[in-house]
Image: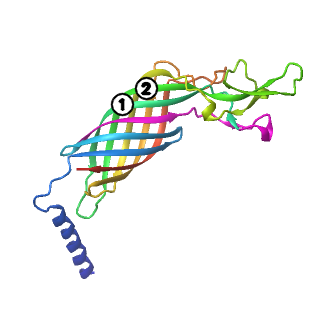
Amino acid sequence: MIRRLFLLCLFAWGGWASAQMPGEQAPTRGFATSLDATHRGYGLSLSWLRKGAAWTWTYGVDAHLVKDLRENLVDSFFGDQGRRYVYGKVNHLVVVQPSVGLLYDLMPRSLINQTDLKLGVKVGPALGVLSPYYLEIFVPNPSTPFVGNREVEAYDPAVHTYGRIVGRANLLSSQLDPRLRVGLSVKTYLLLDFAGGSPAISGLQLGLNADFFPQPVPIMAETEDLRNRRVYLAGSLGLLLGSQW
């Protein structure tokens, strides 16, 4: 037991001594990218880091897909000749967030533990980019109703009934036709940094995104029981990679 304790102390001292080598300077800047998965979609973030004694300033841009939780895939009326699609969806929503934030060391590295636990927050404008949801629509021939053509159209709940929708359109045959909605985006997260003082940055992020808009964002076709929302909350899990110098 005493031998194991001695070896553990010797190992810790060696790690501390190597971390305190004269002439070495702690990194003050860094760049990181994060791949995020949420229950509303997925996202990507790019961040420039500027480190202080306890706080780290972050400057970056995030982009994430926002889905309505009431989106459900349905089978095509045309069976194997069609494709599954989200019935009632009228727009895709992607939120782009230029941000400024802070990271605080909750549990800095120690002689034994080489993992940092940090608390972060990012704030910035939410630039909501809306693009129509395109479907393949069956257009019957006037003379022979059971024969017709497939045409790609943006979903219109007043025109496109279930029996006319073949399925989701191919991305290449869809048009972007973007429209912009401006709001506010806030993200808070915990960062588990595994880098251990090395030049690389690697860690896991567990966060909560909140996107606020002054008016409801038209993702779904509204009915008496379904209304679009102004606030979208999403939990996120991200893989962080980068370097520091």
Looking at the image, is mark 2 or mark 1 earlier in the sequence? 1
Name the residue tied to disc 2. 127
Name the residue tied to disc 1. 98
Q: Residue at x 33, y 36 (%)?
A: 60
Kind of residue at badge 2:
Leu
Q: Residue at x 33, y 40 (%)?
A: 47
- The front one of 176 and 163 is 176
Q: Residue at x 20, y 50 (%)?
A: 27
Pinpoint residue 26: horizontal percent, then vertical percent. 18, 52
Pinpoint residue 227: horizontal percent, then vertical percent. 60, 22
- The front one of 134 and 84 is 134
Q: Is residue 51 left or right of residue 177?
A: left
Hey, which quadrant is residue 87 in on the image? top right
Q: Tell me how the rendering is colored.
A: rainbow
Q: Which mark is residue 177?
A: none
Kind of residue at badge 1:
Pro
The Cα–Cα distance between marks 2 and 1, rounded to whole angstroms, is: 9 Å
- The front one of 228 and 169 is 169
Pinpoint residue 237: horizontal percent, then vertical percent. 45, 46
Magenta range is 56-83
The quarter of the rendered structure image containing the N terminus is: bottom left
Element type where label 2 sits in the image: strand
Element type where label 1 sits in the image: strand
Residue 32 sits above or below residue 155 on the image = below
Contact, mark 2 vs mark 1 (Cβ under 8 Å): yes
- Asked whether residue 243 is drawn in magenta, I would say no
Q: Is residue 26 left or right of residue 161?
A: left
Q: Badge 1: how crowded within 10 Å, few (<14), some, or many (20+)? A: many
